Image: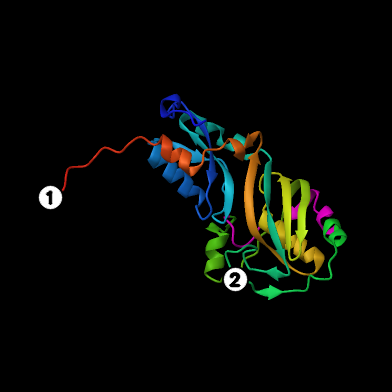
Amino acid sequence: MVKDLADFDFDAGEILLFDKPLTWSSFDGVRKLKNALRIRKVGHAGTLDPLATGLLILCTGKKTKEIDQIQAQEKEYTGTFRLGQTTPSFDRETAVDAEGPYAHLTDADIQAAAAQFVGEIQQTPPLYSAVKIDGQRAYELARKGQEAEIKAKTVTIKAFELTRIALPEVDFRVVCSKGTYIRSLARDLGTALGTGAHLTALRRTRIGAYRVEDALTLADVQALAPPRPEGPAGPE
């Protein structure tokens, strides 16, 4: 059951779990909840791409001091990879730029390839990402058509479970460390299979002990929002 607005003390600090809709940026989530609930100070604990849905954690008031601590916790995602096609952004943001055969792959082939990525691995973030290169966001360079080198970094994949294989689609569940790009995991799996792949759906289901099942939906936020004062009446 959604709490009454009077039960929240946003200035003293609240941790709000929000189920971010598709196409919203993380900043959209912050801005819209800030305006709807009239919160003075709020920030999010971990970016979620516009093409992803799921758990976005918002910290208000004094709880904003806990953002770094929350961001550092492990994440869980579910989603879908599309084998046989690659895109420059490793997801649906950009158009398919290459295709490869996939019909010859067996479930065992795909499971074996996925197993290579469990544990501590080196991963290169996508060029279409917020990684900074010489003071600029990588996606800004990518959208200008500029090439840039992004260094690989160490991340940990604690679990990589394939929950459905229906070629060319593969559904998955991933538990990973901070800084892991699921889009890069799609790219790397496609490379390991020799067919290419990109991410077509993504949902963040957990950050540490915080779960999307406990998150406010957009409808919940709208139900909580206080009524706006009526403006002056217009001309008859």
As for residue 121 lying within the magenta part, the answer is: yes
Relative vertical location of residue 156 with respect to residue 92 in this rendering, above or below:
above
Circle 1 — which element?
Answer: loop
Q: Which residue is mark 2?
A: 95
Circle 2 — which element?
Answer: loop
Quadrant in which residue 150 is drawn: bottom right
Residue 43 in view (yes/no): yes
Colour scheme: rainbow
Q: Which numbered disc flags the more N-terminal residue, 1 or 2?
A: 2
As for residue 5 lying within the magenta part, the answer is: no
Q: Are marks 1 and 2 in contact (CB under 8 Å)?
A: no
Residue 109 is situated, as x and y percent measured from the top left of the image, at 86, 62
Residue at (48% x, 48% y) in the render? 27
Q: Which residues are magenta?
A: 113-130
Residue at (81% x, 65% y) in the render? 193
Q: Nearer the viewer, residue 77 or 165?
A: 165
Numbered label attached to residue 235: 1
